Image: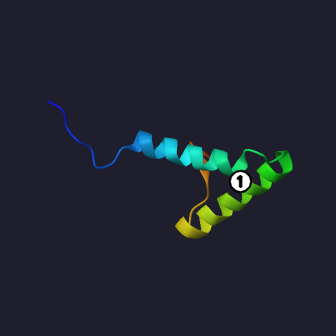
């Protein structure tokens, strides 16, 4: 029995990864740090919680 999915998290992850890769492909290390710092701030202001990796809060 095959089911159809309305939402595919693997496809979404790949789409997001491809989008980020296109944005950062030609950045140097300083630009990458600034890019991810800015994205962390945007996430925190949008969702009201710090960016974390597992149990550890990222101090960017």
> Label 1: how many residues lie within 10 Å, few (<14), some (14-19) or many (20+)?
few
For residue 54, above or below residue 38: above
For residue 38, above or below residue 27: below
| Direction from residue 29 to residue 7 in the image, left or right | left
Q: How is the image coloured?
A: rainbow
Residue at 56 percent across and 68 percent down: it is 46
Q: Position of residue 18 (x, y in %)?
A: 58, 44
Q: Position of residue 54 (x, y in %)?
A: 56, 42
| Direction from residue 39 to residue 49 in the image, left or right | left
Q: Position of residue 43 (x, y in %)?
A: 59, 62
Residue at 60 percent across and 69 percent down: it is 45
Q: Nearer the viewer, residue 52 or 1?
A: 1
Residue 57, can we see it? no
Residue extending farthest to the left is: 1
Q: Nearer the viewer, residue 53 or 31?
A: 31
Residue at 40 percent across and 44 percent down: it is 9
Q: Secondary structure at mark 1?
A: helix
Quarter of the figure with the C terminus: bottom right
Q: Which residue in the structure is indicated by mark 1?
A: 36
Quarter of the figure with the N terminus: top left
| Direction from residue 32 to residue 13 in the image, left or right | left
Residue 34, can we see it? yes
Residue at 66 percent across and 58 percent down: it is 40
Q: Position of residue 21 (x, y in %)?
A: 65, 44
User: What count of labels does the image hold?
Assistant: 1
Where residue 50 sits, quadrant-wise, is bottom right
């Amino acid at each position: 029995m095959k089911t159809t999915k309305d939402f595919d998290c693997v496809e979404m992850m790949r789409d997001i990864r491809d989008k980020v890769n296109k944005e950062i492909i030609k950045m140097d290390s300083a630009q990458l740090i600034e890019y991810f710092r800015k994205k962390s701030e945007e996430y925190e202001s949008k969702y009201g919680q710090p960016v974390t990796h597992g149990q550890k809060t990222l101090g960017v």
